[in-house]
Image (cartoon, rainbow, N blue to C red):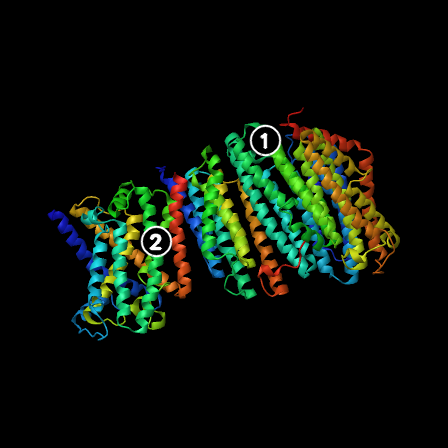
Amino acid sequence: MIEAVVITFLQAVVILAVSPFLVGLIRKVKARLQCRQGPGWFQPYYDLAKLFRKEVVASTHTSWIFTAAPYIIFSSTLAAVLLVPIFLSKVPLNFAGDVITVVYLLALGTFFLILAGLDAGSSFGGMGSSREAIVAALTEPAMILSIFAVGLTAGSTNLSTIVHKTAVLQGVVTDPPPHLMALAALFIVALAETGRVPVDNPATHLELTMIHEAMILEYSGRYLALVEWASAMKLLLFLTLISNVFAPWGIATEPKPVWMTIGIAVWLFKISGLAVLIGVIESMFAKLRLFRVTDFLGLAFILSLLAIIFFYILRG
Amino acid sequence: MNLALIGMIAAPLVSALLSLVVKSRGSMERLQCIHAAVLLATMGAVITNIGGDSERVLGVLRADALSAFLDLMLAFVGATGLLYALGYMGEELDRGHISFHRYGRFFCFFNLYLFAMLLAANLDNIALMWIAIEGSTLSAALLINFERTKTALEAGWKYIILSFVGIALALFGTVLVYYASEHVLGVRIEALQWSELHRVASDLNPTTLELAFIFIVIGYGTKAGIAPMHTWLPDAHSEAPTPVSAMLSALMLNLALYAILRLKSIVDPAVGTNFTGPILLGLGLLSIAAAAIFMLIQRDYKRLFAYSSIEHIGIVLVGFGAGGPVGVFGGLFHMINHSLAKSAAFFAAGRVLLRYGHKNMEGVTGLLRQMPLVGGTMFLSALALAGMPPFGLFVSEVLIATGAYVKQPWVAYLFIGLLAVAFAALVYQVLRMVLGEPKEEGVVVAPSGGRFAAVSLAANLIALGFIGIHMPGFLRDLFIPMTRIFQAGVNIP
Amino acid sequence: MVVHPDLGSQLVNFCSALLLLTCFAILAQRRLSACVDLFALQSVFLAVTAALVAFLTGAYHIYIAALLTIVIKAVILPRILKAVIERLNVTRELVLNINIPTSLLICGALVILAFYITQPIISLGFLLTQDSLAIALAIALIGFFTMIARKKAVTQVIGFLVIENGLFLGATAAAYGMPLIVELGVFFDVLVAGLIVGIYTHRLQDTFDSVDTTKLTALKE
């Protein structure tokens, strides 16, 4: 019992500490690819600290949703990440939920973010919210199906069970064709949900091209800090899902300190690699126009659907 | 025999290379005439000295009875085709339609095409044969588009796309055959050789071979112009320069059929005849039907003859599908007669095109009066193609109908019915062109070109008539071993 | 559910699945040059698969075939195609006969069809993995479908080349590679075919001012 609490607390600390680093890493990679120095490695941390110190300025037209939303978003995202195995395959909280819980916790956060964007009554917020709704509606089934595709091999939708069973399988990848498709689908979903190019440009200044940034345009001070941190945690969640569900080897299968330390190191290495990949992809491609985004997400859905169909029709 | 075989295959290659460096028209004509003579001579040596089943030249070449039969067709019609091409392209050169440079290039590609086909017919290796057939496809693609018109380009593009897809499917079928034979013969190059495959045919896995046969029929069937994969054929054969059309119709289609038939001789012992028979029968009847229907509405005489080719390939398929010694002999006999008749028809059509400058049948009448030799040839070859006695095509069609009747009577009825439609269409269209009063004057062709054409036309017709009336000894000596190849799995009633 | 314990066959399976994924990616593209790049990537994966098969089975002539694949299909042919696209000033947008989501679903159906067709014959051994022959046929069918579903002449060529890739995979993984002389001949043929198609596309552009093949409708009946 004590052990479970300690591990959960440790996981929360790791999540909160590492997520801004990931954002900074991607920014650094993009800057270097553009032949400039870019912001420092710890700039996101400084930004968060600065924002917490600043005064909040809110429009008088907003309601309680505007003030409550950042807290809801932050806590739901943190809860979702706590359900995902990071350095230990059997997360203590796994009794509380499986992949569907994760998806819906994220959806809760997205829902309140959409409402917050609408709440201030500005047109940019409304635009961002409607776009986010489209993206979220299309990514949700793809995400669920792609995790299911791996779950079918493991025989459960519980993330911890999936990761544990795959990790213990003696270093053999089971059933590449469906899993590869599911991986591709999940990667596209990750790009969409975390607001990366080619779905949304996180560094844009033009409101007409924003999705995520438009919704949080009205936020300032600690609210903005919470929302930014939550979006960094979402990024961490997706990268962890990709690396630990499809290639979990290196993760600790028992809660021994040594193994968990190795687990943390391996995990850091994997998600840093994925973050670099995302940075490279952001530099290589241009943002898609909105009606093309639906095509792109449709691709993800079809890939994950095919992964499931493969499993059923071809493996019996 | 070895030297003759090598000589026959090497001659076109050498001639192709030399065509590029020839400087004058006269020397080109001399070169090609020598080339044609060499082809005929070596072919004669090859078909009279067929070696046993395991005699191999240079490790990969082998001329058994079926290959020799195909060599006979390829070399003879190839030689007359060369002579005709000299006349035709010479005329085009005189009129200034093409430059000497292109004239030379034409003969280079033409010779490469013959080389690829001769190579394919004599290779002992199923995969190398595929490579050679692909080579002939590529050289034909360059030839079809020779005239650089819009329609020629479209025809060429259709040909390329459909042929490449077909060839790819045939390659998959070849890989499947290799897959099956590896189990019996091991992972080595011998597993691809026809002679070895014939030997172990009954040991090969039936399911794999069934699948392979389907892919190969669809793949090489595209090249042979079997319906429903035939849509490129009327366009390509009518848009290509006429010597090329003749070669395509008379030789390429037979070569593709050869590939299918070779595989059939291996699939039958493994799977039993009831698999390949119905497939070939069905496709054959479909081809005849499609061709007959379209022949009725044609306005372009080269397209008419192209559809007639589709019909005749269908007839050969019905013969082989019906099986039995009668059907097989009928099919083989039909192949060679069709080559001779179709090339003669195209030679005549080419002369008409040179004279009138268009392919519209409306504007062509009274050929017998205006151009007696050409008109007469067209008339006789059309009668032959329609299946009139005394030409050999009549004999083969009767034999095939008989063979089909033995198998399934309704097939024979359908066969004869469709042939009647095709007969009517072809004879009607050609008679309109040949009889009556000449309408247009056209451009009279120079006599030098006319001489080549006359020789090639006469040679084909004489051969056609000769074979129909009396089967020469060397031909009979080829047929007996050939039917033996196909009997290996046939239940002789 | 069957799980192969053998690492080698798992790796070959993985590489074949990567190949299949690139096929889907080619169909999901709207830019022409992206299609060519994906084809080059696919050829690289193909060469890796071939090298794996060579390593695992000891059939060393497949190494040469793998090398040729990289040289011809990943370097030379994409260069030719890119040059054709550049010189012809072909607009970069693809013209679709069938839209992207539908074509992806049809591809999925084709993959299942391919598995179904090859089901009876995969149990004959000599296979590193059950899936490679089926994936090879699937890639060939998807290439064939690409030729039908896209209108530009260059994309049809890419479809044909994808078919050839699929066949090479089939020959290598299922039949332990064809004898070397056959592989050389096939490569030579593919190269010449690519050149001829390049010539034709030039002429198409010159004559019709576009490489949209739906304009080729003069010959009917």
- Judging depth in this view, the residue of C159 and B140 nearest the camera is C159
Residue B235 screen position, x and y as percent: 68, 53
Q: Is residue C15 left or right of residue B83?
A: left
Residue at the top extreme of this rendering: B493
- Judging depth in this view, the residue of A114 and B177 nearest the camera is A114
- Judging depth in this view, the residue of B82 and C154 nearest the camera is C154
Disc number placed over residue A141 in the picture, else none: 2
Q: Is residue C119 left or right of residue A28?
A: right
Query: In front of the other: label 2 or label 1?
Result: 2
Is the N terminus of chain B in the top left, top right, bottom left or bottom right quadrant? top right
Chain bearing mark 1: B
Q: Is residue A100 above or below residue B319?
A: below
Residue B199 screen position, x and y as percent: 59, 28
Q: Share a chain, discs 2 and 1?
A: no
Q: Which residue is mark 1?
A: B196
Residue at image coords 27%, 66%: A115
Residue at image coords 72%, 50%: B245
Residue C119 screen position, x and y as percent: 46, 37
